[in-house]
Image (spheres, grey):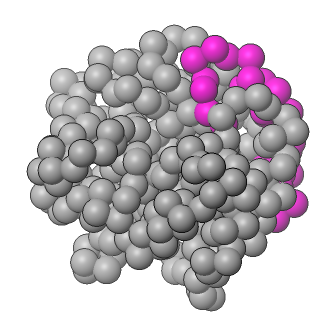
Amino acid sequence: MKNNIKLLDGSMSYPLELDGYNLNNRLWTGDALINNPELIKKIHKGYINSGADYLLTSTYQISYDILREKGIHSEEIKEVFQKSLDLAKEAIIEANTKKDIKVVASLGPFASYNKSASEYVGIYDCTDDDIYNFHTNNLNVIKEIDYEIILYETIPCLREIKILSMIFDKLDQEVWVSMTCNDDINFRDGSSISEACNILSEFDNITTIGLNCFSPLYVEEAYKMLKNNTKKKIIIYPNSGEIYNPKEKIWTGKKLYKNKMIKKWLSLSPDIIGGCCRVGYDDIKKMREEIDNYEK
């Protein structure tokens, strides 16, 4: 019997780096969204050609607060988010595919704003109001954009999940939430992901809960933890297995993705798999091939 596993795309930053794009700026991949949109569209097409069912927008590090600090006015900020959706939709049309590919709006954690790469440690030197206002400001923009699905991704701590739980009901769109974890499948600061699953499972508009940007070596443990703590759909998209040094802003080590590893993931029957940092076209293509050839 054929499986129903769907495929998310991979990293936006990795193809940009391979193209020689300078990501050493506050907007990260969002800089290309604003200044080189055709390159973003090219990357979307690359993932379409690799077999992705879902495309993430290039907005992880784009936020109302960052753009306002850069002197961009509210109406123009809305246009930036709208452009992220338009580029993905244009890529789907231009790829001339018969697949029903959906666009997912990527929203980063407070860590994507505070400059300290704290998504890797989960500790914020700020007030709860700072985090709440950051997400509320984003919400006031994105709820005016025709995104079908909103993904809050790489959430590094239970504290932020609790704050986000105060705004989920204000969204009309389908919501996905993906958290990031240490090797013990707890948040980066050691707080409980199982407790977060219990909180998130209470929201009707949250359809999918998952984990991203962690080692592919721990996918099996991550899936089982999620499965034991929620009845929502499960999404898993680890990074390449390389290790990020936030001080030097470099990746070290080697990629750990192997076809045998992907087969093991599929045997767990997650609803959606994909890739995060340093996972590119070839990795997503391998996943597509394994999904298409896998039978329960």
> What percent of the width, then of the height, locates residue 184?
87, 60
Q: Does 170 appear above or below 12?
A: above
Residue toward you, 24 or 108:
108
**Residue positioned 60% across, 62% down in the render:** 294
**Residue positioned 50% across, 36% down in the render:** 151
User: Does the image show residue 284?
Assistant: yes
Looking at the rendering, the stretch of residues picked out in magenta corresponds to: 180-209
User: Does the image show residue 216?
Assistant: no
Q: Main secondary structure of the magenta part?
A: loop
> What percent of the width, then of the height, locates residue 194?
85, 38
**Residue positioned 28% across, 63% down in the render:** 49
Q: Is 20 displayed left or right of 10 in the figure?
A: left
> What percent of the width, then of the height, locates residue 258?
62, 80
Residue projecting furthest to the front: 1
**Residue positioned 51% across, 11% down in the render:** 170
Answer with the quarter of the image where residue 181 lies. Answer: bottom right
Residue toward you, 131 or 273:
273
Residue 176 belongs to magenta span:
no
Q: Is 239 displayed left or right of 265 in the figure?
A: left
Q: Does 74 appear above or below 92?
A: above
> What percent of the width, then of the height, locates residue 155?
64, 44
Q: Does 12 appear above or below 166?
A: below
